[in-house]
Amino acid sequence: MLEIDIKGRLRDFQLDVSLKVAKGEILMLMGENGCGKTTILNAVAGLFTPEKGEIVVDGRILFDSENRINLPPDERNVGYVFQNYALFPHMSIYDNVAFGLRSRRLSRGEVKTRVESQLETFGLWEIRAAKASQISGGQKQRTALARALAIEPDLLLLDEPLSALDIIRQAAMRKELRERVRDCGVPSVMVTHDPRDVSTIGDQVCLVERGRVVKFSRAGEIATWGDGNADETATSSGTEVIA
Amino acid sequence: MDRGDCLVAVKGPGPRISVPGQGQKVRRIMDLNRFKIEDLRRSCGTNLWAGFQARPKKVALKVTLALLMFAAVMFIALPVASLFIRSYSGITMQTLQDPVVQDALMLSLATSTIATMVAVFMGTPISYINARFNYPGKELIDSLIDLPVVLPPAVAGIALLMAFGRMGVLGQYLNAWGFSIAFTTIAVVIAQIFVSSPFYMRQARTSFEAVDLVFENAARTLGASETYAFRHVTLPMALNGLISGAIMTFARSLGEFGATIMFAGNFQGRTQTMPLAIYTAMQGDLYVSLCLSLILVGFSFGVILLVKFLTRRMYKNVRN
């Protein structure tokens, strides 16, 4: 169970969200550019420090402003798939996937077995020696996910993992992504712009606007959201659902 | 014609029609065959007649540019080539073994290497901090770092004397303890560090800035401490830039003249580096000067090629 309840200033508006994601559940965050979606992910990962609030994963406190607890990113054990993937360009695919395990000072043998099985599972074994710039978009996404999951994280964050792919590749990768995220069985939060991602991958979905959650529903119900003017009418009911 | 209208011109046997953009109306269709070219020039504002004159004008432009370029290249190439041409008749293996040449070469290589190592050691942390963090007075410190680049070397030499000389601000205390820096080999190294370390720090800062913060963030979320992320992600990604900065620093140290001669003096084997030896030998054996110059020219050219190669490779590497 991931519990997020954070407040903080963000450019010209106030970030104020409170979300809960159960184990094995995938929460989708939607909203316009600059509304604070990525900042929420960064706050959970420890790359952004909110002013107030707390972030708890399975009872483990990552951030608690009242008790002055703020774990650094490397102690949070969070899997994060960045937008554009941020694969280390100077390393091979193998070294990218091995990075998290090596930085945890695991023994050589253990790194080897875990990375090899991870590469097998994700279908990256053949390209393990390639550099990040030499592989296709779909392979990059797989590598980023494999790298994030290699550390056996307590939760998974994905920032528009499909947006860097071309339309044709997206459909295939969407299904694959759903399977892989489901298989890992941890609470996941995924930022997206695409309603198709929500209905295919997500369990819950919420709409973020200027730092606040204005709508919250089951992912299947996104079709009933409509577009445009429905936003205002749903504002009040959305916050009620959260509260 | 009015502004915003579109002239559709039809010329020759087959009609050539340009499609009007939005908000434009086709007012009339002109048949170019029926107009004199001068008329058309007046009517639509396009200098068509120039098209017929363009060839000789273009050629003239190209010739002028070529001449200018030739002059510029010759201006640099001729003196360098002359070095080789004049050396050809007089330089033998014996010149290379002349003690003045040998001493200067060894001293220059040794002092420049040490100066570069100190610059890298000192400059890397400062450059990283300046690239990644904001703190009060950052701009001031950054400008101070760049100052020696524009400072006349003679001024640098005097400044160093005032600081570390026998009567200097710090030097008088060092002198009391029995340390004398000015006019020693250490002074040569200090002068080189002072003048050349900005070249490294500048390049290092740019190289660190070129590494997107997202890579460091990714490393941190994967479990890397700040130092681990720096050592395994930021540093290797910036490495080509850092190396080219270090090479520039080494080259600048090798060529240091003004500050060295003022602060360290001109003693063969102790403070007489290659540029100083070139200057001194001019009065006696020209071929010693020429021999040292050739070594420096060859080295400088190699430096430029290497730096170009390294920076090109760096920018290919750091993109996400």
Image: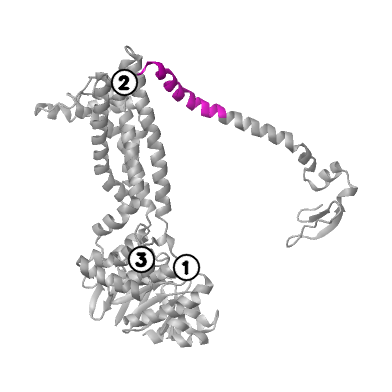
Is A230 drawn above or below residue A168 in the view shown? below
Label 3 sits on residue: A128
Q: Chain of mark 1?
A: A
In the image: residue B144, left or right of residue B32: left
| Residue furthest to the right | B34
- Residue B111 percent across, percent down from the top left: 24, 31
Give the CA separation, mark 2 to mark 1: 62 Å
Label 1 sits on residue: A164
| Quadrant holding the C terminus of chain A | bottom left
Of marks 3 and 2, the one in the foreground = 2
Give the CA separation, mark 3 to mark 2: 54 Å
In depth, the one of A31 and B194 nearer the eye is: B194
Q: Kindly state the secondary structure of the residue where label 3 is placed.
A: loop
- Residue B213 percent across, percent down from the top left: 36, 58
Is B254 drawn above or below residue A100 in the view shown? above
Q: Amino acid at mark 1?
A: Ala
Q: Chain of mark 2?
A: B
- Residue B159 percent across, percent down from the top left: 27, 28
